[in-house]
Image (cartoon, helix red, strand yellow):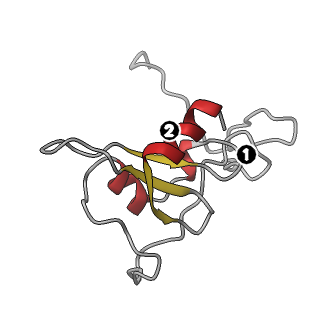
Amino acid sequence: MSVQIHLLTWWRGRLVGQDSYGNRYFEDRKAKPNTRARRWVIYRGMAEASKVPAEWHGWLHYSSDIPPSLDAKAHSWQKPHQPNLTGTKDAYKPDGFAKTGKYKAPKDYEPWDGGKA
C-alpha cells in the first residue's frame, strides 16, 4: 500500500466494514455537507477489482447507502463470490481445450461459411 493511501486512510477514513476475503472498506469521515462521502477499499493481498463481492461493489458505487452486513442471508439462487480466475490454473476451459493450450473444436463443429454455400 502506498504511503499516500495509508495517510489518507489514517487521516480521513472511517472503517465501514470488512468482507469475507479480508478486504476493508472505508468512507471519508470529513465529507462536506450535501456531498457524497468518498468510498474506497483496501485489498487484502494483490489489488484486483474482481475480489470485491457484489454487495460491497454496490456500496462502493453508491447503489446503496447502507453497507452490507456480513450476516445477511443469501438467497437460494446466489452462488458464492469468486474472483476472476483468468490466467490461473483454475480458469474456465471449454470442451475441446487441448493440454497444449490450443482450442480444438469438437467433431460436430461446422464453421460458418458466410452464406457462400
Position of 97 compared to 115: left or right? right
Residue at (42, 15) in percent of width and height: 116
Position of 34 compared to 84: left or right? left
Which image quadrant for residue 65? bottom left
Q: For the residue marked with disc 2, what is the amino acid?
A: Leu
Q: Residues within 10 Å of mark 2 (few under 14, many from 20)?
A: few
Residue 73, position as x, y percentages in the image: 40, 84
SS category of the residue bearing label 1 = loop
Q: Residues within 10 Å of mark 1 (few under 14, many from 20)?
A: few
Measured Cα–Cα span from mark 1 to mark 2: 50 Å
Q: For the residue marked with disc 1, what is the amino acid?
A: Gly
Quadrant location of the N terminus in the rendered image: top right
Residue 95, position as x, y percentages in the image: 69, 50
Residue at (35, 65) in percent of width and height: 67
Residue 66, position as x, y percentages in the image: 28, 66
Does residue 29 sit above or below 73 in this rendering? above
Please give the count of numbered marks on the rendered protein.
2
Q: Circle 2 is placed at which residue position?
A: 8
Give the mark nearer the N terminus: 1 vs 2: 2
Q: Nearer the viewer, mark 1 or mark 2?
A: 2
Residue at (54, 70) in percent of width and height: 80
Q: Circle 1 is placed at which residue position?
A: 96
